Image (cartoon, helix red, strand yellow):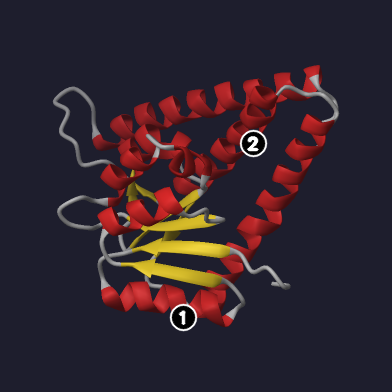
Amino acid sequence: MGKNPKKILIIDDEAVFREAIARALTSCGYHCFPEEDPATGIMRLKKESFDLLILDIMMDPFDGWDTLSHLRTFSNGRETPVIMASAKKLNIEEVIRYGEYVAGFLEKPFVDSEFCEAIHQFFDWYDPLISNANAARLQGVPQEICTAWIRTNRQIRAINQMLENVYVSGLPDEFLSEEERMEHRMAQVREILEEKRKERDNIRIQYPVFSI
C-alpha cells in the first residue's frame, strides 16, 4: 500500500466481525480503526478524515441505515465513501432508498483474501475517478461539476453492485404477486440508473476532460 496506507474506519457492533474485518484489511496493508458503537464511530469521523468507511447494517439500537443517514449531515460523513456490510441479503427497498448514498455492499461472512480483493478493487476504481476529477478542476471545471462527476459514477457502480445481493421483498400487496412486485421495484431501480447515466453522460459531453 506504499508509505501512506489507506485509512479505513470500521463500525460494527459484533466483535467477531469487527475484528475479522480489521485483521483481514490490516494483513493486506490497510490502516484500520474499528469501532463498536455507531455514535463513537460518528464522533471519530467528525474529527478525522478516512479513505473509506465499512458500516455494518444489522446493529442495535441504531442500524447501519440510521447511521448512514446521520453521516450525510456533516462534511466528513458526506465526503467519505461508505461500503455497507451485512450477513443478510439486501431488500430491493433498501436499494431504492439508500443506493444513491453508498459506495458498495459486501456480504458477510467472508474469506479474508476475497474481502481484501474487494477493497483493492474499490480503490483501483475510486482513486482514478478522484484523480480525474481533480485534474478536471485544475483545468477550470467548476467544483460542483467535479463533485457531481464523482457522485454519479459512484452511484451507478454502487446500485449495480447492490442489485447483485438483493432478495425479493416480503412487503404485502393484495394486488400484485411476489414476482410482479419485484419487477415493479426493479423497474424503479432501472429508472434511477438511467437518470444517473444520463447525468454522467451529459457531464462528459459538456466537459470532455472527464474520461473514466
Residue sitting nearer the eye, 87 or 204: 204
- Give, as a three-letter code, the residue at label 1: Arg
Q: Secondary structure at mark 2?
A: helix
Residue 58: x %, y % from top left: 25, 57
Percent x, y of residue 84: 41, 53
In this rendering, the answer to whether 109 lies above or below 83 is: below
Determine if residue 212 is in view.
no
Say which quarter of the image contains residue 185: top left
Residue ID at (28%, 75%): 15
Q: Residues within 10 Å of mark 1 (few under 14, many from 20)?
A: some
- Quadrant in the picture for residue 146: top right
Q: Give the position of the C terminus as an image quadrant.
A: top right
Give the labeled residue for mark 2.
Answer: 150
Q: Amino acid at mark 2?
A: Ile
Which labelled disc corresponds to residue 23?
A: 1
The residue lying at 58 percent from left, 40 percent from top is 154
* Rendered view: 108 above or below 173: below
Pick the front one: 169 or 110: 110
Task: Work out how far the residue at label 2 is from the one at label 1, CA to CA, in angstroms.
Answer: 30 Å
For the point 64% across and 36% down, the residue is 150
Q: Where, quadrant-wise, is the N terminus in this rendering?
A: bottom right
Question: Between disc 2 and disc 1, whose residue precedes?
Answer: 1
In the image, 153: left or right of 40? right
